[in-house]
């Protein structure tokens, strides 16, 4: 296979990967974005049940459920945030750099993120399996199972890893002069 043809296939494969991962994380992010209303509803219910004259028993599940919803909101919405470039960046020098220099720097630094997310995913999967096998529960009065939340964490970290690789490919494509 000629070298130029192999390069074209590689670029095409990266473009396809970027397209599919960005589309997936965009859709997941748009759905998860409305999770804020779920959290507000849970916390509102918690506040209402604590009003004495309504004679309702305060709900034991609301605090933990709001925390679980927050885990999903942040971890499943994180890849969408990266895709939109809404993450925080230290802009001391970066803003003055050329697009090419930014792409080189981003391509280098995203490798650290990929490594970190890989280690995090490994630990999250191991922890989720442990929680599922031993039916681990929280030490509260409600005592919900923990593995569903940990499974959501695994999904969020995995999507974040896919998006980090997508960002790496975008930088490589930019450096190669290909369209993203």
Image (spheres, rainbow, N blue to C red):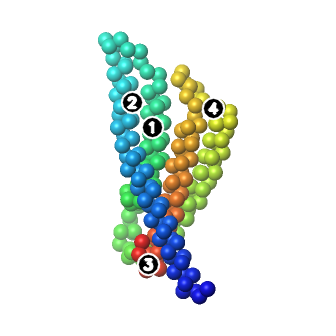
Rendered image: mark on residue 178: 3
Going from the N terminus, do you reach mark 3 or mark 4 first? 4
In this figure, which residue is indicated by the disc labeled 2?
Answer: 42
Sort mark 3 into few (<14), some (14-19) or many (20+) by Cα contacts within 10 Å.
Answer: some
Report helix, strand or loop for mark 4. Answer: loop
Going from the N terminus, do you reach mark 1 or mark 2 first? 2
Q: Where residue 113 sits in the image (x, y, percent)? A: 53, 59
Rendered image: mark on residue 136: 4
Going from the N terminus, do you reach mark 2 or mark 3 first? 2
Q: CA distance from mark 2 to mark 4?
A: 23 Å
Image-based side of 16 in relation to 47, left or right: right
Q: CA distance from mark 3 to mark 4?
A: 49 Å
Q: Where residue 77 sits in the image (x, y, percent)? A: 43, 49
Sort mark 2 into few (<14), some (14-19) or many (20+) by Cα contacts within 10 Å.
Answer: many
Image-based side of 127 in relation to 54, left or right: right
Report helix, strand or loop for mark 1. Answer: helix
Asked if the residue at tag 2 contacts the one at tag 1, i.e. Cβ–Cβ closer than 8 Å, the answer is: yes
Going from the N terminus, do you reach mark 4 or mark 1 first? 1
Report helix, strand or loop for mark 3. Answer: loop
Asked if the residue at tag 3 contacts the one at tag 1, i.e. Cβ–Cβ closer than 8 Å, the answer is: no
Asked if the residue at tag 3 contacts the one at tag 2, i.e. Cβ–Cβ closer than 8 Å, the answer is: no
Q: Where residue 115 sits in the image (x, y, percent)? A: 59, 60
In this figure, which residue is indicated by the disc labeled 1?
Answer: 69
Q: Where residue 11 sits in the image (x, y, percent)? A: 50, 76
**Residue displayed at 55% across by 53% down:** 158
Going from the N terminus, do you reach mark 1 or mark 3 first? 1
Is 146 located above or below residue 123 in the figure?
Answer: above
Residue 66 appears in which quarter of the rendering?
A: top left
Between 145 and 20, the one lying in front of the other is 20
């Amino acid at each position: 296979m000629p070298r130029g043809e192999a390069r074209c296939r590689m670029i095409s494969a990266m473009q396809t990967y970027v397209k599919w991962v960005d589309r997936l994380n965009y859709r997941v992010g748009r759905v998860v974005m409305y999770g804020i209303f779920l959290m507000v509803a849970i916390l509102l219910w918690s506040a209402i049940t604590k009003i004495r004259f309504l004679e309702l028993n305060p709900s034991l599940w609301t605090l933990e459920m709001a925390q679980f919803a927050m885990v999903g909101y942040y971890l499943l919405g994180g890849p969408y945030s990266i895709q939109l470039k809404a993450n925080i960046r230290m802009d001391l020098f970066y803003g003055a750099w050329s697009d090419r220099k930014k792409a080189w720097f981003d391509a280098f630094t995203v490798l650290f993120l990929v490594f970190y997310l890989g280690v995090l995913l490994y630990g999250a999967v191991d922890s989720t399996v442990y929680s599922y096998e031993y039916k681990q529960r929280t030490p509260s009065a409600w005592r919900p199972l923990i593995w569903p939340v940990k499974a959501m964490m695994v999904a969020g970290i995995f999507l974040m890893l896919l998006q980090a690789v997508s960002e790496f490919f975008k930088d490589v494509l930019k450096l190669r002069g290909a369209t993203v």
